[in-house]
Amino acid sequence: MAAARRPLMAGNWKMNGLGASIAELSRIIGGFDAALSARIDCLICPPATLIAAFAARAKGSPVAIGAQDCHPGAAVAFTGDLSAEMWKDAGASAIIVGHSERRAGHGESDALVRAKAAAAFRAGLLAIVCVGESKAEREAKRTLEVVGRQLAGSIPDGATPQRLVVAYEPVWAIGSGLTPTAADVSEVHGMVRGELVKRFGAGAGATRVLYGGSVKAENAAALLKAAEVDGALVGGASLKAKEFLSISNVYI
Ligand code: PGA
């Protein structure tokens, strides 16, 4: 029997948040009461400038702090970049890699995403690897092929359910208010899990697969309760504690 998968609610703050935003983090921590934290994990990924302060504030709470990207190297001459080891040192326990905004906006290839995920493994951090098709690819019925290819290219060897989370984020659903149907999400998540089991063995069936793209309080129940969905990677709706908590409370 497959091990039970504990849901993960992850907030991706992208390029939002200033020092004063620690008050919003405090509200999120305050809302993660005993009932909620007994059922699900919570991760907030603020911009680089806030990682250390957020990690200090969240210490001892049910909320973990994650980064949004890393350089694949450990200590190399690369002006402006940050390593997985630096994130760990600052208090992060996870790193999002391969978000479509970086794949598209910074030309990140599957090979680079794979190297970044390997860097997270190397530092002992959880890698959240993002995959997802474009609108044209969905319309051409190429979703499973595209996501399958991204998955094969972006996940490093040595992935385990403790080190890896996959986030399925259709590019056309991000920030658009559009979402796939629950059945479409389940189909992709089932394929992702099947591919992980094929490559890494039966134990990989316990890897969490998150859905991301326009998750809001109104659609959270339908998306998060769909088969094969183990939580969400939430962008815009994670910036306000009230909204993020009402999405999370779908699990209560
Ligand atoms: P969104 O972003 O929830 O604002 O659509 C999700 C993401 O990009 O991770």
Image (spheres, rainbow, N blue to C red):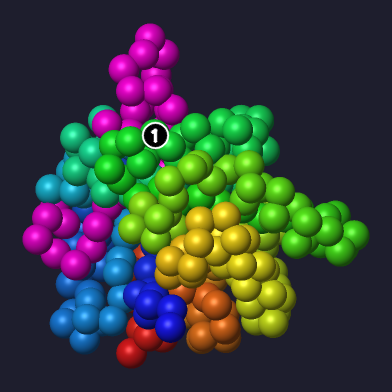
- For the N terminus, the image quarter is bottom left
Vertical position of residue 74 compared to residue 240: above or below = above
Mark 1 residue CB less than 8 A from any atom of ligand 1: no
Q: Find the magenta span and give its range.
A: 57-85
Q: Is residue 66 magenta?
A: yes
The residue at the point 35 percent across, 26 percent down is 82
Q: Which residue is mark 1?
A: 119
Q: Main secondary structure of the magenta part?
A: loop
Query: Residue 199 occupies which quadrant of the picture?
Result: bottom right
Mark 1 crowd level (few <14, some 14–19, many ≥20, 10 Å Cα):
many
Relative placement, left or right, of 124 versus 240 is left
Q: Kindly identify the amino acid type of the residue bearing the numbered disc 1.
A: Ala
Query: Residue 25 occupies which quadrant of the picture?
Result: bottom left
Choose between 145 and 215: the one closer to the eye: 145
Relative placement, left or right, of 236 versus 222 is left
Choose between 162 and 22: the one closer to the eye: 162
Can residue 232 be spotted in the picture? no
Instruction: Where is residue 6? Give x, y as percent.
Output: 35, 75
